[in-house]
Image (spheres, rainbow, N blue to C red):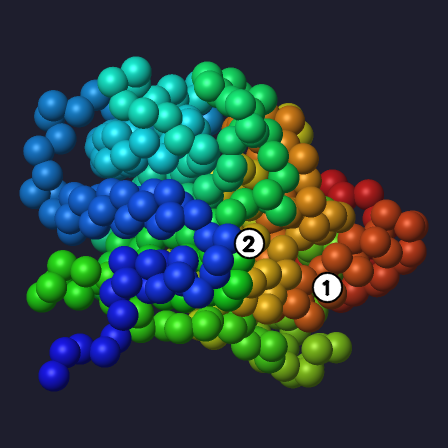
Amino acid sequence: MPHRTPTFSKFIIEDQRRTPDRDPNLTALLNDIQTACKYIATAVARGALNDDTAVEAQTNIQGERQKPLDVISNEIMLRECEWGGKLCGMVSEEMEEPYAIPHAYPRGDYLLVFDPLDGSSNLDVNVTVGTIFSVLRAPAGTEQPTAETFLQPGTSQVAAGFALYGPASMIVISLGAGVHGFTLDPEIGAYTLTHPDMRIPTETCEFAINASNERFWEPPVRHYVSECIQGKAGPREVDFNMRWVASAVADVFRILVRGGLFMYPRDMKDPSKPGRLRLMYEANPMAMIVEQAGGAASTGRERILDIVPRDVHERVPVILGSRSEVERVVAYHQAYDNGEDLVFSTPLFKNRSLLRVLA
């Protein structure tokens, strides 16, 4: 009896058949992306067994020192996705300028933006990393895309997803009608549907934030965290746990499965950067997935998917997860911006007003 669980390829083909306006070229592109993710998963799984001597790692456009696998993963995505004739151009975290499809290959109607290896700083300690990607339509008549070609709001995404390279390799994807997770079956070499129609639980007692940046947070974020750490004795009357993997793919996947809140908020650590995560190839695809799973995604002051990018490497604050928790943090930002005074007291933060000038 044949196995009835659909593979990733079968799933997106069947989705195309069910959706009359679904472009078969998008299906083909997603197949190329999943192939790239398989190659990257294999490279990540080899860990220290990889021969990195031939790879020249440098400092990327973000000012971050690359790992050899950053370079390898970026090259894999480019090589696997450039030849199929479905793309007009690509943007990557690891490249300053958009990547033009070589003249040897036909050009298509789509744009691909991606972070080839999210969380790569965790490679040395064998923690889950991943790939984040977003697919946009190229404007009609585009032959040679420029950076401006890619500057579309997250609402324009036709597909978004991320891969996980951890205890199991997975792909989580949304085509605009729900979120589905696929686990790589090493026996057949295919991603297989294991998490259909993922929905973020509405009730939660977890949040994820880098607490070492507490002194740089804005008051609304401090207020939210202070309520959580007070537990049952505080105004929330619930004991919260804090989880922080420092790998967005791992933190967001946990939220899809268990609920919770992920925050990489605006802070004053580097005033020249309004946020830490990149809008186009980190925040937007994650926001689409979270919203399609019933959650919400905001900067604290506006919906992430509504932002019109000004630069392909633009950074934004990110607050996403269970809708009620996101709405709570947004309300605290609104109160703070309106000059309302919310006083809170915790052993960590002492007595403080939301409007008090922070030292």
Residue 326: image quadrant is bottom right
Name the quarter where the N terminus is drawn.
bottom left
Left or right, 48 with reference to 136:
left
Quick one: label 1, few (<14), some, or many (20+) residues within 10 Å?
A: some
With respect to residue 285, does 275 lie above or below?
above
Horizontal and vertical percent position of residue 265: 62, 47
C-alpha gap between disc 2 and disc 1: 17 Å
Q: State the SS at label 2.
A: helix
Q: State the SS at label 1.
A: helix
Left or right, 99 with reference to 186:
right
> Closest to the observer: 287 or 149?
149
Which residue appears at 54% of the width and 67% of the height?
293
Residue labelled with disc 2: 288
Residue labelled with disc 1: 327
Which residue appears at 79% of the width and 58% of the height?
332
Identify the amino acid type marked 2: Met
**Numbered disc in front, either 2 or 1:** 2
Q: Are marks 2 and 1 in contact (CB under 8 Å)?
A: no
Horizontal and vertical percent position of residue 155: 62, 47
Identify the amino acid type marked 1: Glu
Residue 306: image quadrant is top right
